[in-house]
Amino acid sequence: MRKHLLNAICSLALLTAGMPVVGQEVLDPDPNTLAPSKDPKRQANGLAQTPPMGWNSWNKFACRVNEKVVRDTADVIASNGMKEAGYEYVVIDDCWHGSRDANGFITEDRTRFPSGLKTLGDYIHSKGLKFGIYSDAGTKTCGGRPGSQGHEFQDALQYGRWGVDYLKYDWCSTGTRNAEEAYAVMADALKASGRPIVFSMCEWGNSMPWLWASKIGNLWRTTGDITDKWQGKYNYSWGVASIVDMNEPHWPYAGPGHWNDPDMLEVGNGGMTEVEYRSHFSLWAMMAAPLIAGNDLAKMNRSTRDILLNRDVIAVDQDPLGKQGHRVSKQGDLEVWSKPMVDGGRTLLLWNRGATPARISAEWTAMGLPGRLQMQARDLWTKKNLGQFSGRYDAEVAPHGVVMVRLKS
Ligand code: GLA
């Protein structure tokens, strides 16, 4: 208990100072200590014991989403190996909404979704997949469609009738609402719907949900929107490396059923190189992030497929221990990351953020391993067994690239 308290104080002090937790081995944070809820009797919904996987319409289609796109996507996931690799939720983001009916129930936009969402949900389920949808805690969604404020229980009931399995819940037009209360109301409404519905909170980390949401939501965004670029800030969105820096410090708060969400994948959307997309996917797996593809699956090329379907990297993300990996050392642009795995081993990531090739060395001791321990190493991108190593592993890493290695004793 004292250890937990000390951890909490240390992490919070570092977070407040805006510094990442570097060179510190994975402690054992207890979410009940770190993330007290205003309602001590609140029970988690028990879903998403590993980070959710699937596809979401927003990054590629934004408000151009329609029934055909969603059906085609479900067909592809069910037939190209993605379903077997774990991709499960097909999520329609903003702009599916029609207006509210005379009784206040939300309806779908029948021009975009002519068969209706019940039929579309049935179709997704018939492919062995799950159905996700989007709403907002305010009066309007970010795309200006009707929000759920004041209609939470009614909306959850409607989602239940449509067969919804996942709700992403946004934070536009919320005025002075309190985030914890607003998200708790929808969490209760989803429980009352009679369906198990994964609850994805999207308030961009504004009110530090990692401190209070572990029993309210299954995942919470820690940042503003991702954009299909390597780094930097662009109006209200950020490139991959910048998102990583914002998400990384919250590693102690993630665990089975409650995950930090650094936003959906941009792999395959065309704005980054193959090397950068591989780094993006690897970093998301290291951070036990939800793996929600955000590209046009019906038109993806071989390299995008190979990235999204790397089963070894997916296994790192989905490791049942549920620890979020984090940075353990940094020298300029050269970083070493470690993720503890259920078998007692580690996944090691060497990340070169810079523009020239560089050698990066990872010390066992920085990862909380005894210095003399013999470890078997396997490269998760080249798929080569590298042999036995003791004390350290080092490799040449391409500019903007990663080397990702599974270490087992
Ligand atoms: C916000 C969210 C995005 C997306 C859009 C939809 O910006 O952060 O992920 O859902 O709204 O309008």
Image (cartoon, rainbow, N blue to C red):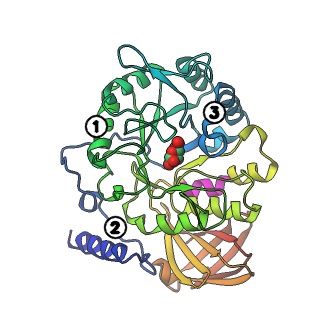
Query: Is residue 165 visible to us here?
Result: yes
Task: Report the Cα–Cα distance between label 2 and label 3.
Answer: 42 Å
> What residue is rendered at 71% in x and 54% in y?
307
| Mark number, residue 73 | none
Q: Which residue is mark 2?
A: 28
The quadrant in which the C terminus is found is bottom right
Q: Is residue 29 above or below residue 361?
A: above
Give how far across and how far down residue 164 sits, in percent: 47, 28
Task: Return the disc, 2 or 3, that comes first in the chain's sequence.
Answer: 2
Q: Which of 408 and 180 lies nearest the eye of the viewer? A: 180
Residue type for callout 3: Val
Q: Which residue is mark 3?
A: 65
Q: Which residue is mark 1?
A: 185
User: Which secondary structure lies at badge 3?
Assistant: loop
Task: Return the disc, 2 or 1, that comes first in the chain's sequence.
Answer: 2
> What residue is rendered at 73% in x and 75% in y?
399
Camera-near label (2 vs 1) is: 1
